Image: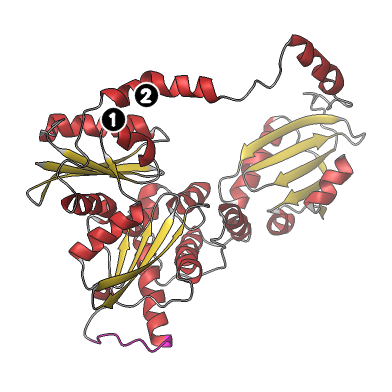
């Protein structure tokens, strides 16, 4: 009999198929918010590629998206921390601390030996993606760091800067300020890794000391070399500070390990749970009900439970538009003429975009443009002012700058005045 363990996470679906104690099939893929569709695809592949048989084999599910899908195929639901703990206790009986970082959550598990086995303390963060894989990847995309480059970027030897890991928005603000201050991208990424480890140790450890041996699980811990280095440096320093005895002959890599199959521990834990339950539990019933749900059921459910529309009828829409639809003031329409006369330029070097307007000395709006910020303030300024020049405005009589990049760029551009953003907004309004 084969047993499948399927982890339907916030960003990926992972699955293993085990027979006679051996993994016969495994894979993981991003589901791009289509959890049910990706689970259906995986179950179909296991049937075709590994002989996974409805009515004969078993399937156990875990993960944030498993509650809906498991009953549709006859599967048994396992809480994800229970699944991870079961796999760790089976495969690594000497491990005392586990950190699993997922796409949008983090888990820590402390194992304390007792006469009857291990006592477990579990802490989980799932209400916010701060400090998770999504947190790292979104920050890297903003800095235009590719996935491969992110995986290879080191932590060791880099100057670190303060970045908050409590919230993705806070982290983006910190990273933006560092970019605008000219800090190297490699240092910002290393600082992100530092922030993630700090978030785990300061928030999820709840004052407890992670004891060796330590196991790092989940995609970010597996794929990001710099994150592994940050864990090892911080944990070794913590153990030295708190006088935790560490075998001197062992390197940090032996005390703080990242298994090659770190992605699949929740799946493997499902299989461990299955081995302790009745043989009829989790009997796989095929994918017909799941197909129906994807094609019809979810749409019926949405239609039944959906909220009322924004408007009841055309009359209500007309009343709304009469009251709110007409703007009290209309924005100026830029003109396209470029006469060679002196112009005034205002630039906003923001966190995600860079904008500029060209005004005549009589305050007529002549031209406006914007471009996406590319993580380099000077390149942003070049791209923006190139658009101004291409529009024919080269005689710049005055220049004002605002936004994140104003302090760095005011002298480089020879700006007449840097303006605080709120003052700029209020003056324009």
The C terminus sits in image quarter = top right
Q: Quadrant of residue 53?
A: top left
Q: Is 33 rendered above or below residue 121? A: above
Q: Earlier in the sequence, mark 1 or mark 2?
A: 1
Q: Is 226 rendered above or below residue 264? A: below
Q: Quadrant of residue 367?
A: top right
Query: Which disc is residue 294 wearing?
Result: 2
Residue at 82 percent of width and 44 percent of height: 425
Q: Provide the major secondary structure of the magenta segment.
A: loop
Q: Is residue 252 left or right of residue 203?
A: left
Is 336 included in the stretch rendered in magenta? no
Q: In this rendering, does residue 68 appear at all? A: yes
Task: Give residue 353's position: percent from left, percent from top.
Answer: 64, 42
Distance CA(mark 1)–CA(mark 2): 9 Å
Q: Secondary structure at mark 2?
A: helix
* Residue located beneath label 1 in the image: 40
Residue sitting farthest toward the right: 362
Region in magenta: 241-248
Q: In this rendering, does residue 398 appear at all? A: no
Tag 1: Cα neighbours inside 10 Å, few (<14), some, or many (≥20)?
Answer: some
Q: Are marks 1 and 2 in contact (CB under 8 Å)?
A: yes
Residue at 68 percent of width and 58 percent of height: 408
Along the line of sight, which residue is nearer the eye, 370 or 167? Answer: 167
């Amino acid at each position: 009999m084969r047993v499948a363990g399927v982890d339907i996470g916030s960003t990926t679906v992972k699955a293993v198929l085990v027979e006679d104690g051996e993994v016969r099939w495994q894979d993981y893929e991003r589901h791009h918010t289509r959890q049910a569709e990706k689970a259906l695809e995986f179950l179909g592949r296991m049937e075709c590629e590994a002989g996974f048989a409805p009515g004969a084999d078993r399937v156990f599910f875990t993960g944030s998206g498993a509650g809906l899908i498991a009953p549709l195929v006859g599967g048994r639901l396992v809480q994800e921390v229970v699944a991870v703990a079961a796999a760790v206790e089976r495969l690594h009986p000497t491990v005392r601390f586990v950190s699993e970082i997922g796409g949008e959550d983090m888990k820590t598990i402390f194992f304390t030996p007792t006469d009857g086995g291990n006592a477990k303390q579990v802490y989980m963060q799932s209400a916010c993606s701060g400090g998770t894989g999504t947190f790292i990847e979104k920050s890297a995309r903003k800095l235009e760091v590719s996935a491969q480059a992110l995986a290879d970027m080191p932590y060791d030897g880099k100057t670190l800067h303060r970045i908050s890991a409590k919230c993705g928005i806070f982290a983006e603000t910190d990273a933006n300020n560092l970019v605008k201050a000219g800090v190297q991208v490699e240092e910002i990424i290393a600082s992100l890794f530092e922030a993630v480890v700090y978030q785990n140790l300061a928030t999820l450890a709840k004052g407890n000391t992670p004891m060796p041996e330590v196991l790092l699980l989940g995609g970010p811990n597996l794929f990001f070399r710099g994150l592994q280095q940050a864990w090892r440096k911080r944990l070794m320093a913590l153990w030295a500070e708190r006088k935790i005895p560490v075998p001197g002959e062992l390197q940090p890599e032996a005390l703080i390990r990242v298994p090659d199959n770190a992605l699949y521990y929740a799946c493997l834990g499902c299989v461990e749970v299955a081995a302790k339950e009745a043989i009829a539990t989790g009997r796989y019933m095929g994918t017909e009900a799941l197909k129906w749900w994807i094609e019809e059921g979810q749409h019926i459910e949405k239609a039944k439970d959906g909220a009322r529309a924004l408007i009841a009828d055309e009359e209500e829409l007309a009343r709304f538009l009469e009251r709110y639809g007409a703007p009290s003031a209309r924005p100026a329409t830029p003109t396209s003429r470029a006469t060679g006369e002196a112009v005034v330029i205002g630039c906003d070097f923001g966190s995600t975009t860079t904008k500029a307007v060209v005004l005549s000395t009589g305050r007529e709006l002549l031209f406006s443009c914007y471009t996406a910020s590319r993580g380099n303030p000077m390149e942003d300024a070049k791209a923006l002012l190139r658009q101004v020049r291409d529009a024919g405005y080269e005689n710049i009589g005055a220049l004002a700058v605002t936004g994140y990049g104003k302090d760095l760029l005011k002298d480089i551009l020879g700006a007449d005045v840097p303006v605080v953003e709120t003052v700029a907004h209020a003056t324009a309004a």
